[in-house]
Amino acid sequence: MSDVISDEEIKLSLSKDEVLAFLKDNPDFFQNNPEALELLIPPKKRPKKGEVADFQSYMIQRLKADKDEVLESTREIVENSRANMNNQQRVHTAVLRLLEANNFQDFIHAITMDLASILDVDIAVLVVEADGETIPQIQMNGIRIIPEGTVDKWMQEKAVLLQDNISGIEPIYGGGATLVKSQILLRVDISMDTPPAILAFGSRDPDMFGEGQATDQVIFLARVIERCFRSWLKLPV
């Protein structure tokens, strides 16, 4: 008797349930053996309710879904890149305006008036802590004074704080507080000889600022303002 096993016997040696069980235990089988897909003959007609799904139709739908996902991801990347470029250009313009100030009063005006327009926010404020002594060089229009210890209380040891869907803080924005729905607060350390300060930008858009946004550019702006202050007031670091 011959020991050779015919093709028909090989086909019959595996049941449908065994094949399905093997594929369940090896979900990456077709990924590792793509040539096996060429051996399959998917149904040509579209499936009716209760029938086996059309493998070819499924693959086409999957490809369309993958294409839509790639297009959406590409669109988001392009939009984010454009937004970053736009923000970078605004910060560069703001820095140039600060450097072009003709005197200290003009420098303060640039911070409290011009930056809001340049950065496309509704209000910009410089807030400085009182230290119990008179500080003539910062007692100027456009600068708001807050009690000692307030900066650490608000900033919670952070260099930058972004908040969305808020109510504006009156000690920061004064009469404009009702307008502010989101904000970014930047710690400004002018010098060891001056009290802590905050540069605040407020927007009526509740989603303008929020956690997770990049802050490297506005932090750079704060560092420029610190250096400009020290230069105008001839202060040490």
Image: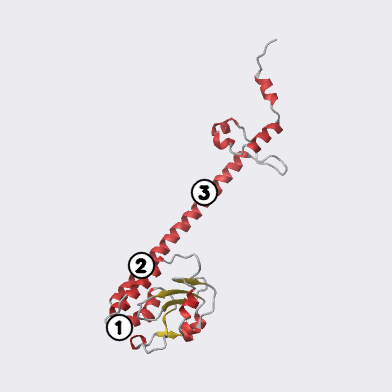
> Which element type, helix, strand or loop, lies under badge 2?
helix
Q: CA distance from mark 2 to mark 3?
A: 33 Å
- Return the residue at label 3: 67
- Return the residue at label 1: 104
Q: Residues within 10 Å of mark 1 (few under 14, many from 20)?
A: some
Task: State which quarter of the image contains the N terminus.
Answer: top right
- Residue in view at x 59 percent, y 35 percent: 29
> Which element type, helix, strand or loop, lies under badge 1?
helix
Of the residues shown, which amino acid type is indicated by label 3?
Lys
Whether residue 203 can be seen here: no
- Residue in view at x 68 percent, y 11 percent: 2
Task: State which quarter of the image contains the C terminus.
Answer: bottom left
- Residue in view at x 65 percent, y 38 percent: 24
Task: Give the label, 1 or 2, closer to the camera.
Answer: 1
Q: Position of residue 131 (x, y in %)?
A: 41, 85
Q: Residues within 10 Å of mark 2 (few under 14, many from 20)?
A: some
